[in-house]
């Protein structure tokens, strides 16, 4: 991963994305006690907290915005972690500044959601964040080739975006391998259907960050679930 010249992202937080790591998605957490849920997974070892933003347009559901991001980002940073913000919204260029101010460390936009992916990725770096590009299951790997120099993290959706708890798309490891061939220094993140059963194969294919929502927060013992997925992925 190449550090952008204008970055203000602390090196320790940047480095969190460079080691294999499970990123709990708070989409499946109990939002009535969000701080406690974040504390629980961080005590289990998590350092990257995945934050899903949906606008009711790019995907049907509406979730949360900068206000909730800022409500937990201080806690996450104080515990040595980073906020991984996944924008499933149309025209993400209009919202990146608000999320940077709300404590985002990595901001990921969808290639399908903007006509201006290149400009928006550069603007994310200028805001001092890592720039992520997400690809839907139906989006070609070649999309990354045109934008590679602007991307710190490529998010390969391993379900169709919009909902937690969907089954892992079985062809995903092949796509991750093909992304790896064109990703350069960018880290490959996978999101959707990641569990102790699926993490090993996708890790072997080259994924570095493993987002898991329902497999962690839907488990009887989320800390144990986190550790078993990390073990299956060969992650920290
Ligand atoms: C879905 C979101 C995911 C979601 C994954 O569109 O981007 O981050 O939380 O949920 P699971 O791990 O349950 O598939
Ligand atoms: Zn996500």
Image (cartoon, rainbow, N blue to C red):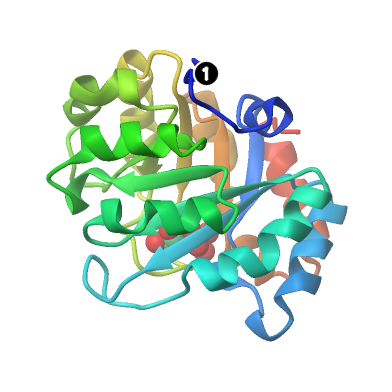
Whole-percent x, y for residue 187 in the image: 49, 26
Residue 154 can be seen in this image: no
Give the side of residue 106 with respect to residue 59, left or right. right
Write down the residue under mark 1.
3
Whole-percent x, y for residue 115 in the image: 12, 45
Q: Which image quadrant is residue 116 in?
A: top left
> What residue is at 45 percent from the left and 15 percent from the top?
185
20 up-or-down from 86: above or below: above
Depth check: give the residue in front, 156 or 172: 156
| Disc 1 residue: CB within 8 Å of ligand 2 | no
Depth check: give the residue in front, 84 or 210: 84
94 up-or-down from 228: above or below: below
Neighbour tally class for label 1: few under 14, some 14-19, many 20 plus, Cα within 10 Å: some
> What residue is at 74 percent from the left and 81 percent from the top?
33
Which quarter of the image is occupied by the C terminus? top right
189 up-or-down from 136: above or below: above
Give the side of residue 101 with respect to residue 181, left or right. right
- What secondary structure is marked by label 1? loop
Residue 128 can be seen in this image: yes
Q: Which image quadrant is residue 186 in?
A: top left
> What residue is at 42 percent from the left and 33 percent from the top?
126
Q: Which image quadrant is residue 69 in?
A: bottom right
Whole-percent x, y for residue 35 in the image: 76, 71
Give the side of residue 149 with respect to residue 200, left or right. left
């Amino acid at each position: 991963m190449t550090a952008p010249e204008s970055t203000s992202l602390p090196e320790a937080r940047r480095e969190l994305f460079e080691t294999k790591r499970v990123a709990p998605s708070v989409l499946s957490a109990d939002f009535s006690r969000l701080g406690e849920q974040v504390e629980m997974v961080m005590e289990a070892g998590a350092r990257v907290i995945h934050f899903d933003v949906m606008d009711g347009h790019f995907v049907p559901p509406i979730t949360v915005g900068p206000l909730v991001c800022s409500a937990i980002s201080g806690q996450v940073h104080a515990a040595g972690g980073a906020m991984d913000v996944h924008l499933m919204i149309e025209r993400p260029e209009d919202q990146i500044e608000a999320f940077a101010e709300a404590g985002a460390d990595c901001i990921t936009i969808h290639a399908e959601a903007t006509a201006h992916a290149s400009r928006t990725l550069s603007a994310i770096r200028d805001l001092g964040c890592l720039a992520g590009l997400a690809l839907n299951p139906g989006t070609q790997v070649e999309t990354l080739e045109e934008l590679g120099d602007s991307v710190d993290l490529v998010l390969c959706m391993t379900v169709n975006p919009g909902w937690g708890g969907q089954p892992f798309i079985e062809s995903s490891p092949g796509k991750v391998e093909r992304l790896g061939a064109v990703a350069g220094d960018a880290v490959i993140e996978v999101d959707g259907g990641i569990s102790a059963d699926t993490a090993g194969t996708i890790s072997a294919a080259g994924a570095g960050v493993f987002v898991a929502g329902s497999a962690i927060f839907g488990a009887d013992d989320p800390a144990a679930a986190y550790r078993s997925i990390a073990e299956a992925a060969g992650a920290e």
